[in-house]
């Protein structure tokens, strides 16, 4: 496979998040998740796509030989079928993991911490290590013995004299604005797409019956037919008896008041008194 001319690539970490497309099909395959290195050759082993499903057998790795161009915004690979499963043993070989790793000499002198690397794009071999504090150090993997361990990178003692100030090549203002605007727009669109895909994935998983529950149901249904029928037929509920309604205490009718007796008139009283006197006189006269 012929690679598109691209002799030097600065700041490999800037590939993170870049769009990956296939040259043959013209399909968008995803975005760069990480860049992996061979610790023996100090060359790029391949790149991974940002994973969405987190499945161990997911085909999300592209070998360096299938990469045609490491562009500033897009990585072009040969074809879609170049996607393979992640090779074993690459844990701890990604640039994200190696970032901030210490650089020490063979005599144990600390030269700083790595923040990024510059590579020869056609071979993928690391040419320069970028250190914190805007410094860089050129390395020669073919000539010098360089050991990349899990905690540090060991280089010859003479490399201390190779450390110089790092000045990154500046893009013109217009190109920089266009590039940054494209990245922001693409990442915003990707975040929306990822959210939709994740939601669809969750809904599809939720709609699938649980295997353990289906097994339990299958075992339960293998019992007696009568039990099976009893389980299926819902028991009829007896109508609940209505509690007798409590009668409200009858309100007592107000007692009728007896009509008040009228006091006798004065005339009647006088007449009665006179009559009594007459009767008394008659009784006295008879006795005499």
Image (cartoon, grey):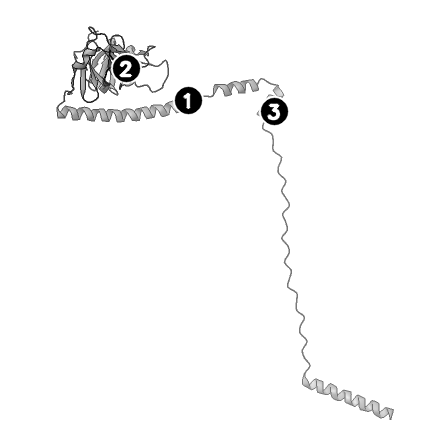
Q: Quadrant of the C terminus?
A: bottom right
Label 2 or label 3, whichever comes before in sequence order: 2
Residue 273 location (% of width, % of height) = 74, 87
In the image, the segment drawn in magenta is: 203-207
Whole-number angstrom distance, CA of label 1 to CA of label 3: 32 Å
Q: Nearer the viewer, residue 233 or 14?
A: 14
Question: Magenta span: helix, strand or loop, mainly?
Answer: helix
Q: Is residue 176 above or below residue 156?
A: below
Whether pointer 1 and pointer 3 mark residues with C-beta atoms closer than 8 Å, the reply is no
Which quarter of the picture shows residue 84? top left
Q: Which mark is residue 152?
A: 2
Q: Quadrant of the N terminus?
A: top left
Whether pointer 1 and pointer 2 mark residues with C-beta atoms closer than 8 Å, the reply is no
Label 1 or label 2, whichever comes before in sequence order: 2
Residue under the image location 16 percent in, 14 percent down: 161
Disc 2: CA contacts within 10 A as few (<14), some (14-19) or many (>=20): some
Q: Residue furthest left?
A: 172
Q: Nearer the viewer, residue 218 or 103?
A: 103
Q: Which mark is residue 205?
A: 1
């Amino acid at each position: 496979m012929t690679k598109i001319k691209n002799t030097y690539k600065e700041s490999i970490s800037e590939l993170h998040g870049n769009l990956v497309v296939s040259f043959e099909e013209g399909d968008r395959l995803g975005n760069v998740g990480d860049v992996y290195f061979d610790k023996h050759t100090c060359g790029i082993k391949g790149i991974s796509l940002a994973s969405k499903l987190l499945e161990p057998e997911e085909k999300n790795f592209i070998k360096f030989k299938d990469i045609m161009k490491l562009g500033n915004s897009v990585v072009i690979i040969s074809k879609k079928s170049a996607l393979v499963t992640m090779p074993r043993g690459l844990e701890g070989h990604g640039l994200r993991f190696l970032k901030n790793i210490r650089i020490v000499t063979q005599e144990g002198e600390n030269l700083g911490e790595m923040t990024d690397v510059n590579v020869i794009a056609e071979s993928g071999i690391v040419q320069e290590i970028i250190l914190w504090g805007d410094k860089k150090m050129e390395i020669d993997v073919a000539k010098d013995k360089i050991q990349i361990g899990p905690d540090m990178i060991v280089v010859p003692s003479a490399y201390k004299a190779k450390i110089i100030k790092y000045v990154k090549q500046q893009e013109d203002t217009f190109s920089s604005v266009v590039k940054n605007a494209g990245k922001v727009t693409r990442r915003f669109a990707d975040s929306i797409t990822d959210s939709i895909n994740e939601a669809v994935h969750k809904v599809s998983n939720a709609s699938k019956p649980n295997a353990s529950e289906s097994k339990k149901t299958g075992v339960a249904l293998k019992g007696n037919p009568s039990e099976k029928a009893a389980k299926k037929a819902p028991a009829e509920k007896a109508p609940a008896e209505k509690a007798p309604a409590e009668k409200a205490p009858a309100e007592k009718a107000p007692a009728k008041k007896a009509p008040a007796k009228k006091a006798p008139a004065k005339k009647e009283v006088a007449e009665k008194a006179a009559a009594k006197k007459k009767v008394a006189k008659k009784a006295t006269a008879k006795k005499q």
